[in-house]
Image (cartoon, rainbow, N blue to C red):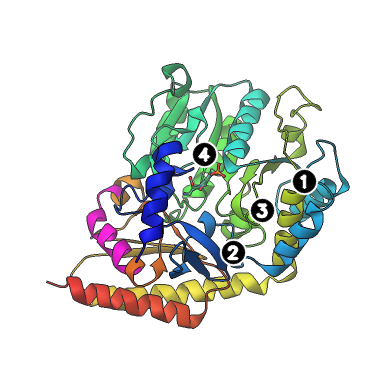
Amino acid sequence: MIENSKKLFERAQRTIPGGVNSPVRAFKSVGGTPLFMERAAGAYMYDADDNRYIDYINSWGPMILGHAYPAVVEAIQEKAALSTSFGAPTELEIEMAELIVSMSPNVDMVRMVSSGTEACMSALRLARGYTGRNKFIKFEGCYHGHADAFLVKAGSGVATFNIQTVPGVTAGVSMDTLTAPYNDLAAVQQLVADNAGEIAAIIIEPVAGNMGCIVPQPGFMQGLRDICDREGIVFIFDEVMTGFRLSAGGAQHSLGINADLVTYGKVIGGGMPVGAFGGKRAIMQHIAPLGNVYQAGTLSGNPLAMIAGFTMLTTLKKNPGIYIELEEKTAYLHSGLHRVFSNGDQPFVINRFGSMISIHFSDKPVTNFAAAASANNAYFNQFFHAMLAEGIYLPPSAYETWFISAALSIDDIDHTVAAAERFVLATKK
Ligand code: KE4
């Protein structure tokens, strides 16, 4: 029974485009009424009709420790009483920068912003200002936020809604955006050869999460690193999703690959609007007011966002066992899902890296966007709704990774697998 969500959705659509403040929330590709949530705690969210859901979205990544994590909530409550923003520098911002530098490989300096989009667009501008070059390479199905230059063959909602060219993104902007299939090093080598001396950056999701979870194949990431070294191209790791999730050192640590610039979001803010970009001093010193690559933000580094992020990152840094727990819980989920879908008649692959996981109803490996797009995504949509009816809230798109939180219990995972098993049996021909 979701009568209140239905009423709220109808009302929301009168004053908010599509009734949501971010398209992926609209259930547009899976169909049905998006659920309006009222509260959440730990692994569970409760909708406007007081239905409880086991949450595998976790605000698209930030809630790595579960919802309403007490230390984060208390820190925000305390800080709010001292003003919610100054628009002036504070010691807390220095502490946050020092913490990020201590956790992130190859990051000597960091600039706070208010979203992953801001982080990625700023990092690209910096790479262009630093190299004096205009073009950059992104990968089909990767999503780096909604800044114009990135909305070319992008993942997440752009892929979910199959938007081939985004109105409003001009040819003048997209002409400098070069794209290659994920895991296709030869395609990148060809782009570099065809645009010699003109490419400022290669930006990548080091473990992709916006076309489902796509894992880099052996040699791919090192191959990109070698190209960047040879050609003087800035290698940008978009770690908005992987940062502080795969490990304290993010994908750079987990993959053992050094990036030149790294972008962050999601986990870094503990649910508050926070993004960041950072990297080697030689590059970061070009950012205003030190250098002339202008970048700014009224609420960048504001005290509430900083204290939420600082509390979250400090908790993760002090408890590295959380990452082992996340990995073990995700592996347990993986093996359970593999067992039940192996008894079905739909081909499938499960992609997983650390606590990032997705299932694709495909009879071939899913190593790039084209393979994700050619999977039986209609069956995924059926699966989504069957799980939702059992109180399990998966990302409403086959082009999203599932986000695991440390608050998930083994019972929650057992319930998830049992619900998947009932779906498999119900759809078996
Ligand atoms: P935001 O501007 O949404 O904070 O971050 C953009 C972004 C950048 N880079 C990566 C790798 C990302 O995954 C994202 C945002 N991810 C989507 C979920 N796939 C956010 C959900 C939404 O758009 O509402």
Residue hosting label 3? 268
Q: Residue at x 49, y 42 (%)?
A: 21
Please state which of residues 168 and 192 is positioned toward the viewer in this rendering.
168
The residue positioned farthest toward the right in the image shown: 91
- Res 84 label: 1
Q: Secondary structure at mark 2?
A: loop
Relative to residue 367, is residue 127 drawn left or right?
A: right
Q: Amino acid at mark 4?
A: Gly
Q: Nearer the viewer, mark 1 or mark 3?
A: 1
Q: Secondary structure at mark 1?
A: loop
Report how far apart the C-alphas of labels 4 and 1 lie in the structure: 26 Å
Query: Is tag 4's residue or tag 2's residue first in the polypeptide sequence?
Result: 2
40 in magenta: no
Relative to residue 164, is residue 253 drawn left or right?
A: right
- Residue 425: image location, x then y, percent: 21, 77
Relative to residue 187, is residue 76 drawn left or right?
A: right
Query: Is tag 3's residue or tag 4's residue first in the polypeptide sequence?
Result: 4
Q: Quadrant of residue 11?
A: top left
Report how far apart the C-alphas of labels 1 and 2 lie in the structure: 24 Å
Residue hosting label 4? 145
Disc 2 C-beta below 8 A from ligand 1: no
Query: Is tag 1's residue or tag 3's residue first in the polypeptide sequence?
Result: 1
Contact, mark 2 vs mark 3 (Cβ under 8 Å): no
Disc 4 C-beta below 8 A from ligand 1: yes
- Residue 422: image location, x then y, percent: 26, 77
Residue hosting label 2? 64
Residue numbers of the magenta segment: 373-387
Q: Amino acid at mark 1?
A: Thr
